[in-house]
């Protein structure tokens, strides 16, 4: 990991930070506007830290829509998603609404605040699930975490909120330092689509060809994939608690 840099927000006018604040290219007026917007929101310091990198500067994450950094607001550390100018999104209001709906069923990092250009949420300090799974080989611990993820997806399904990016979830399942899993990025979430949270995440964790199912079965022992696919099919046909629990039992 590259060394972290803590900057008072006034210093974001300097490069390469200005162009991270207004990715991909700083425009002087936009930089000024964004800095004053952040000041109004009480942000004092931006911390460039994390496994991601933009212009050789460490960040928490870089997606297609936003760049995520840590900010200090009073004595609190928060995750700040900054809207990319080339991400094809006008604002973060839809994402904020979806995140709050997820929070209502205790899913996702806690929503804190939103503006056109910025989304503030609880900072999940930890690792991607894949990395966590590689470093934890305790069966019970593994089961608890995977069960928690599936339960969260069940609650999203129940709330008719489809995350939309859980079948290829490597960057959207995070583990905090206490071993609690978090689903992040409700940017493409919708309450209009048919929900597929449980089925998508099961595909990703247990069925697909990524490294995750391999890691899971290495620790939990090989399971019958056809049986999993069947129970998934049943759940898809009838989204009942009973079918969900059969799925839990088959997978875990
Ligand atoms: N609240 C958070 N705490 C910690 N890391 C986060 C948080 N939100 C997002 N991230 C990290 O930043 C990355 C990019 O954020 P994301 O919301 O996925 O952006 P995009 O919508 O552009 O894909 C995520 O993949 C995740 O690794
Ligand atoms: Mg993303």
Image (cartoon, rainbow, N blue to C red):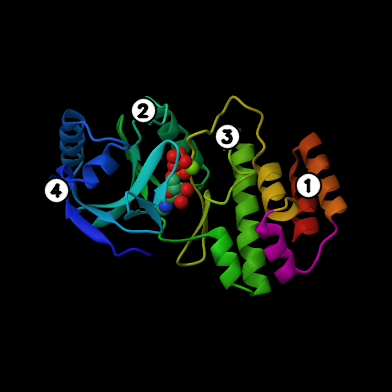
The residue located at (60%, 68%) in the rendering is: 134
Q: CA distance from mark 4 to mark 3?
A: 39 Å
Where does residue 10 sit, x and y in percent of width and height?
Answer: 12, 46
Residue 103, can we see it?
no
91 relative position to 35: left or right: right
Secondary element under disc 3, as helix, strand or loop, is loop
Q: Nearer the viewer, mark 4 or mark 3?
A: 4
> Badges 4 and 1: C-beta atoms under 8 Å apart?
no
Classify mark 3: residues with Cα within 10 Å, few (<14), some (14-19) or many (20+). Answer: many
Q: Residue 217 magenta-drawn?
A: yes
The residue located at (45%, 66%) in the rendering is: 177
In what quadrant of the picture does the C terminus appear? bottom right
The quarter of the picture where residue 115 lies is top left
> Badges 3 and 2: C-beta atoms under 8 Å apart?
no
Q: CA distance from mark 2 to mark 1?
A: 40 Å
The residue under label 3 is 161
Q: Nearer the viewer, mark 3 or mark 1?
A: 3
**Residue stretch rendered in magenta on the structure:** 210-224
Classify mark 2: residues with Cα within 10 Å, few (<14), some (14-19) or many (20+). Answer: some
The residue under label 4 is 11
> Badges 4 and 2: C-beta atoms under 8 Å apart?
no
Q: Earlier in the sequence, mark 3 or mark 1?
A: 3
The residue located at (32%, 58%) in the rendering is: 49
Q: CA distance from mark 4 to mark 2?
A: 24 Å
Which secondary structure type mostly characterizes the magenta part of the structure?
helix
8 relative position to 203: left or right: left
């Amino acid at each position: 990991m590259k060394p972290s840099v803590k900057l008072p927000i006034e210093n974001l006018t300097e490069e390469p930070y200005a162009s991270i604040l207004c990715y991909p290219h700083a425009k002087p007026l936009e930089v000024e506007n964004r800095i004053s917007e952040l000041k109004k929101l009480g942000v004092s310091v931006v911390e460039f830290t994390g496994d991601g990198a933009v212009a050789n500067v460490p960040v928490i994450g870089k997606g297609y829509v936003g760049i995520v950094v840590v900010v200090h607001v009073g004595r609190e550390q928060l995750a700040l998603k900054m809207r990319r100018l080339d991400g094809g999104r006008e604002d973060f209001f839809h994402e904020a609404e979806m995140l709050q709906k997820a929070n209502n069923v205790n899913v996702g990092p806690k929503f804190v605040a939103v503006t056109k250009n910025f989304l503030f949420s609880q900072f999940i300090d930890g690792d991607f699930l894949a990395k966590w799974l590689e470093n934890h080989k305790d069966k019970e611990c593994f089961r608890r975490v995977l069960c928690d993820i599936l339960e969260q997806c069940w609650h999203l399904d129940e709330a008719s909120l489809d995350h939309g990016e859980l079948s290829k979830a490597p960057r959207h399942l995070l583990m905090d330092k206490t071993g609690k899993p978090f689903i992040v990025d409700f940017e493409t979430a919708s309450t209009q689509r048919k929900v597929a949270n449980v089925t998508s995440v099961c595909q990703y964790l247990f069925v697909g060809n990524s490294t995750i199912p391999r890691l899971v079965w290495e620790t939990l022992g090989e399971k019958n994939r056809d049986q999993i696919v069947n129970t998934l099919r049943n759940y898809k046909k009838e989204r009942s608690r009973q079918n969900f629990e059969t799925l839990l039992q088959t997978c875990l």
